[in-house]
Structures are given as C-alpha cells and as structure tokens.
Image: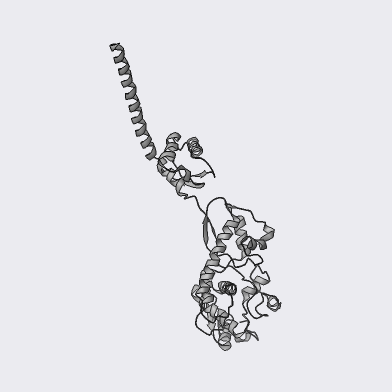
Amino acid sequence: MTGGRCVVKWLLLVVVSLAVGAASYLAVDYTRFLDRPVALEDAQIYEVPAGASVRRVARELSEAGLLEHPLYWEFYARVEADSTNIRAGEYRLDPGLTPRSLLALFVSGRTVQYSLTIPEGWTFAQLMAAVRGHPHLVQTLDPEEDREIMARLGRPGEHPEGWFYPDTYLFPRNTTDLQFLERAHRRMVGVLDAAWADRQPDLPLETPYEALILASIVEKETGVPEERDLVAAVFTTRLKRGMRLQTDPTVIYGAQITDGRLRSRDLRTDGPYNTYTRTGLPPTPIALPGGDAIRAALNPADTEVLFFVSRGDGSHQFSTTYREHREAVIRYQLGGDASRYPGSARR
C-alpha cells in the first residue's frame, strides 16, 4: 500500500507540475501574443460589421491571416477589455499593429473617414451633383424631389438654396446623403445665427434669411477676400437708399445661364432675380455663402461706396459717385476709350 501511495503521489506531482508548466507557458505565450505585431506587410482596410460579436471578428481576422490565436484575442477582449464596446465601421490596419492595439482601435471607433468638399459659391444644384456622385455616400433621396429635402430637414416649404455650409466634411462609410446634408445644414444655421447675433445695428435686413441672401451675393461678387466688407457695403448702402442692386450673379442665377455670359436681353428681361429691373433682394440666396461672406454681409465696411468695377485681376475699383465709377469703367474695362462708354452704367 505504501508503495502504491507513493506512485499516486508521484503521478499527482507530475500532473500538477505539467499543469503549472502548461499554464506558465500559456501565460507567457498569451502575453507575447498580445504584444507581437499582427501579420501585416501593408496597410489594409477591415470592416467590423454592425452587430458583430467579438467571436465573429476574431474568426474573420484569423481567416484573413491576421490573428495567430483567435481564442487568445477573444479571451482578452472578454476578460481584460470591454468587448461590448467594439464599434462597427471600416478601420485602417497598419503594419506594427498588435492584437492589444487592434482591440483598442476597434473600441475607439476611429474609423476610416471619407471626405467631400463643398466650395464657397457653389449652388445647391452643384452640391447635390457632388453628393450623388460620391462613391461612399449611401443614396436615399429621390433626384426628382430636391425641394422636399428641406422638409426632411424640418423646414418644409423653404427653398434649399444657400442653406448648406461650404466646407470639407469627413464621414465614415455608410453615411447617407441625408445625414451629410443634415450636418452641412446644421453648420450653416449655427454660423448664420452667431453672425446675426453679432451684426451691426441699423442694417437694412429684417431677418437672418435676408442676411443669407445678401451674403450669397457678396460671395459671388467677391474675387479678393479682403474686399468682402466693401462689396457688402455697396449693396447695404444701395438697399438703404432704395437703389437697385444691379448685380450680374443674380441675373445669371435667375436665367439659369450656365456659361456665365450675360447678354443685353438678359439684363432687360424682368424676373424675380433680375436686380437691374427690380429693387431689393432677390427671393432666395443664389449660392452657398461661406462664413466670411456671411459676417461681411452683417458687418459691412463703414463707407458710402455705391459702385465697383472689376480691374481685371480679380480685384475691384470702388467708387462713391457715378462720375468716379464712370472713370473707373473707362480705365479698367474700356481701355481708356471714353467713346465706348454706354449711355447708362450697369452699376
């Protein structure tokens, strides 16, 4: 019996020693696994599907050859980290990433971001063409119902022109066209409200929407950023005096002129956007103004300028009297030939 007991004790000792050794090996192997870079030679994109479990993600990463021990990674995610915080989306996996930092990346939600730039001065139609042409925006809006977009944004019956802030926007995969537009619209509302609250007193503008309309004209008429407040001053002064704005971009917008070439008949043809035949602002914005144009419209330069004419280099010559304006037109547009000056100035 004594000999049998010794054998049993010896066997138990061997088993325990093997178990301890195996556990020690697994612990060391587990730790090394977590801090050893995954098998990545080049950067690649991996998408965590919406609602995917950590087991599914571990299996997919293993099948892709990125995880040597998926069970280790699943154990780490469940026991030593918060696996429930894995966020769906596309992730960029770079060489040098470890299983530990891989999980941290998925928990952080730092997904791959795509971009779309809305330039200042674009029209709503140009914006929608860019949105519909973007390969990473999910299209949900009917192209035949652009007017209904404002209703989807909580502003039924409003014209969409001008209501989307020009900027470069970053967004993850599966962002919808409406989500993108909601973001640009919220940004415009925020910028406009802030500028309206900080406006000059005694402006000839009754509402923030009128400021948006004026800002869109300032945006289209300004070639040099430093002139925005002067351009705004011309139109503000004209509005105060009941003068016609006489600005080409409104006519171009209303007549839907795509080549930018204004003809005499365009200026004579009356319409809601023809500021040569009608006083006051047009009924809607004519473009998407940027923040600088909005702030200029609400804080114009302190001057009585009434006219401006292009110098041909993007800048303008500003004048306070018709005589000064006439001389500027002759100099900068007619090559100094006064005989070519028309009987009446367009501005």
What residue lies at 30% left-to-right and 14% top-to-bottom? 5
Can residue 196 be seen here? The reply is yes
Query: In the rendered image of this protein, does residue 242 appear above or below residue 295?
Result: below
Q: Position of residue 100 (x, y in %)?
A: 40, 42
- Front-most of 318 and 183? 183
Residue 188 position in % (x across, y down): 55, 66
Question: Which residue occupies the foreground of this view, 151 or 337?
Answer: 151
> Residue at coordinates 52% horizontally, 60% vertically from top-left?
168
Q: Is residue 89 above or below residue 213?
A: above
Tell me how many marks there are.
0
Question: Is any part of residue 98 visible from this angle?
Answer: no
Q: Check the image and tell me how it is coloured.
A: one colour
Residue at horizontal 56 percent and vertical 88 percent from the top: 321
Q: Nearer the viewer, residue 139 or 12?
A: 12
Q: Residue at x 60, y 57 (%)?
A: 178
150 left or right of 34?
A: right
Q: Is residue 151 left or right of residue 41?
A: right
User: In the displayed structure, would residue 152 be above or below residue 284?
Assistant: above
The image quarter in which residue 272 lies: bottom right
- On the image, the x and y values in percent for residue 234 come to 56, 81
Task: In the rendered view, tell whether residue 67 sits above or below residue 165.
Answer: above
Quarter of the image for the N terminus: give it. Answer: top left
Quarter of the image that includes the C terminus? bottom right
Q: Position of residue 75 (x, y in %)?
A: 43, 36
Q: Nearer the viewer, residue 260 or 141?
A: 141
